[in-house]
């Protein structure tokens, strides 16, 4: 497939953002052929550039940058300098999409607000904030761990039980789905532009996405429904939807939702057909009233054999369960490979994680390596209409920086 056949071939995108969530929206656009320019400030640039170096056990591979900024070109310009601001203005005049997550006061100071680009009515302006753009906390900074995971309620509820400390998030756990939400808003705005000829501002926030992720609980509260706090595993209300440990120390989650049909199948599959006629477990009411005892029976049963045995047994019975995967397993998951979830990363010999949707009739762009800071300065500026002499002057004046 040629680049021209990709859905966003010819779409010009400016990624004037840092860390993860907002840049992810640009990454997915690039996956489908958009020309994305990654803008960084001279000097430290996007802090995500160096985050990997804080890992004592790292091997020198900048893996988060490779993942979150692939298929982009790099431009390092000083937006505080008048010449740098002029360069940006020219690039915006030629762009379709501008994405930023700079704090609102910084956008005001640097004249990077949607209103500052009013001269470009077809521009789609993608704005990502921590807590939204109005209200007392609109200007407050935040990360996914604070605004999505903690403030959104997941940190409180996703823990072993209510007596343990709140659950810890991993890096990017809320950023990546939030980036997909911003991408969805941008593509919606692009579709609207096809009908109206006008661009628009797209807004999303980490808090909005965190509350969307925990919306089952939040909507219950809004409707006056009290959701009980999470109790210990042994006191979960349904034994057929609980976690169990196998003889080799592995955990899996049993998730059976139709107990009338699946309870007999489970009892037979695990070699405990006698439980079907046990009056304590004969119906949903009995299994709920005797959940502790049934959980104890399941604990002893599943602890008697290794995960491989139970995986084959439960699969053969057509029962739904999920293995609690380890990172080494996930990174080499044969199903992820078969489904294209893991893709080759340029010509590095490494793999990377694909964005989480595909078009059956349209392959994605081949993955290219994430750019060095300012790695395409001259190339991008020439395309924008600047001469080699002007580019040299920008470099000598400190307006641009980096390797390109």
Image: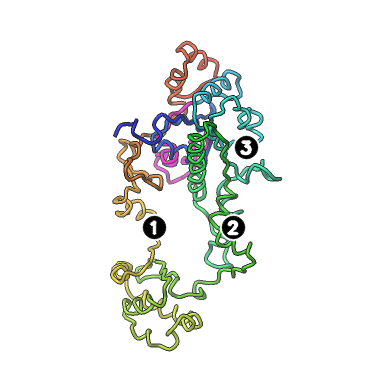
CA neighbours of label 3 inside 10 A, class few (<14), some (14 to 19), many (20+): some
Residue at which label 1 appears? 326
Q: Please name the residue that numbered disc 3 is placed on.
A: 103
Return the residue at label 2: 153
Q: How many marks?
A: 3
Instruction: Give SS at disc 1.
Output: loop
Q: Is residue 239 above or below residue 336?
A: below
Q: Which mark is residue 262?
A: none
Q: Earlier in the sequence, mark 3 or mark 1?
A: 3
Q: Helix or strand or loop: what does disc 2 sit on? A: loop
Percent position of residue 62, x then y: 42, 39
Cα distance, mark 2 to mark 1? Answer: 25 Å
Measuring from the top left, give residue 1's x and y in whole percent.
29, 34
Image: magenta residue range:
46-75
CA gap between label 3 and label 2 equals 23 Å
Label whose residue precedes the other's in the sequence (3 or 2): 3
Query: Is label 2 in contact with label 1 (beta carbons under 8 Å)?
Result: no
Query: Dot 1 surroundings within 10 Å: few (below 14), some, or many (20 or more)?
Result: few
Q: Is residue 142 above or below residue 327?
A: above
Occupied quadrant, residue 312: bottom left
Of badges 3 and 1, the one in the foreground is 3
Identify which residue is drawn at 58% across, 36% down. 201
């Amino acid at each position: 497939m040629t680049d021209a056949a990709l859905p966003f071939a010819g779409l010009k995108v400016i990624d004037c953002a840092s860390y993860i969530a907002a840049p992810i929206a640009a990454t997915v656009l690039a996956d489908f052929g958009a020309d994305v320019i990654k803008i960084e400030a001279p000097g430290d640039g996007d802090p995500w550039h160096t985050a990997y170096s804080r890992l004592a056990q790292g091997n020198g591979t900048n893996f988060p940058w490779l993942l979150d900024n692939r298929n982009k070109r790099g431009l390092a310009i000083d937006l505080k300098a008048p010449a740098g601001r002029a360069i940006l203005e020219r690039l915006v005049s030629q762009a379709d999409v501008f994405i930023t997550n700079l704090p609102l006061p910084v956008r005001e100071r640097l004249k990077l607000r949607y209103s500052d680009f009013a001269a470009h009515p077809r521009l789609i302006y993608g704005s990502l904030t921590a807590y939204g753009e109005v209200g007392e906390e609109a200007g407050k900074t935040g990360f996914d761990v604070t605004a999505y995971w903690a403030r959104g309620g997941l940190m409180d509820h996703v823990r072993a039980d209510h007596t343990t400390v709140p659950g810890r998030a991993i890096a990017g756990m809320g950023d990546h789905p939030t980036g997909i939400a911003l991408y969805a808003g941008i593509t919606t705005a692009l579709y609207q532009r096809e009908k109206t000829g006008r661009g628009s501002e797209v807004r999303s926030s980490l808090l909005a996405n965190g509350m969307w992720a925990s919306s089952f609980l939040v909507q219950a509260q809004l409707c006056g429904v009290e959701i009980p706090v999470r109790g210990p595993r042994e006191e979960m209300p349904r034994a057929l939807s609980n976690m169990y440990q196998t003889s080799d120390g592995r955990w899996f989650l049993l998730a059976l939702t139709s107990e009338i049909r699946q309870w007999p199948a489970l009892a037979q599959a695990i070699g405990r057909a006698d439980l079907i006629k046990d009056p304590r477990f004969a119906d949903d009411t009995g299994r709920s009233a005797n959940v502790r005892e049934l959980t104890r029976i399941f604990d002893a049963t599943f602890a008697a054999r290794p995960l491989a045995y139970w995986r084959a047994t439960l699969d053969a019975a057509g029962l739904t369960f999920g293995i609690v995967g380890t990172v080494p397993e996930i990174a080499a998951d044969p199903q992820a490979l078969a489904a294209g979830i893991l893709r080759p990363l340029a010509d590095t010999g490494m793999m990377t994680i694909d964005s989480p949707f595909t078009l059956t009739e349209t392959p994605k762009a081949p993955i290219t390596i994430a750019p060095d800071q300012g790695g395409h300065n001259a190339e991008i500026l020439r395309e924008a209409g600047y001469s080699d002499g002007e580019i040299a002057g920008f470099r000598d004046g400190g307006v641009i920086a980096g390797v390109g």
